[in-house]
């Protein structure tokens, strides 16, 4: 299972407005451990790896793609 953290999307933007009380998801960028927000491509890259031959032997795992953040 791929478990994304906060991703810079329309849904992520709406989520932080509602739960964090900020105007823009970008306001949270500096709080992230890597100093950047997760992008949809970051999630896609994890999925691409898991469905490739390189990931063929990975089973029964929860892969957190969140850069150590929330």
Image (cartoon, rainbow, N blue to C red):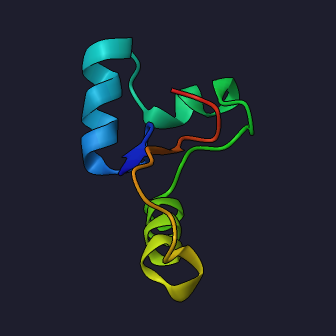
Q: What residue is at 38 percent from the left and 25 percent from the top? A: 23
Write down the quadrant of residue 13 in the picture: top left
Give the percent coordinates (x, y) of residue 24: 42, 32
Exactly how many numbered labels are in the figure? 0
Q: Is residue 9 above or below residue 30?
A: below
Q: Nearer the viewer, residue 33 or 65?
A: 65
Indicate left or right for 59 with 37 as reference: left
Q: Is residue 1 above or below residue 24?
A: below
Give the percent coordinates (x, y) of residue 65: 52, 47
Give the percent coordinates (x, y) of residue 8: 43, 48
Q: Nearer the viewer, residue 54 or 20?
A: 54
Write down the quadrant of residue 51 in the picture: bottom left
In the displayed orientation, state which residue is furthest to the bottom.
53
- Residue 21 visible in the snapshot: no
Give the percent coordinates (x, y) of residue 3: 39, 44
Indicate left or right for 68 with 40 as reference: right
Q: Nearer the viewer, residue 42 or 20?
A: 42
Indicate left or right for 58 with 9 as reference: right
- Residue 54 visible in the snapshot: yes
């Amino acid at each position: 299972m791929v478990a994304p953290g906060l991703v810079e999307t329309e849904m992520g933007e709406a989520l932080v407005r509602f739960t964090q009380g900020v105007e823009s998801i970008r306001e949270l960028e500096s709080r992230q451990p890597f100093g950047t927000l997760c992008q949809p491509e970051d999630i896609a890259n994890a999925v691409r790896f898991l469905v490739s031959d390189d990931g063929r032997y990975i089973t029964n795992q929860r892969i957190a793609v969140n850069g150590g953040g929330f």
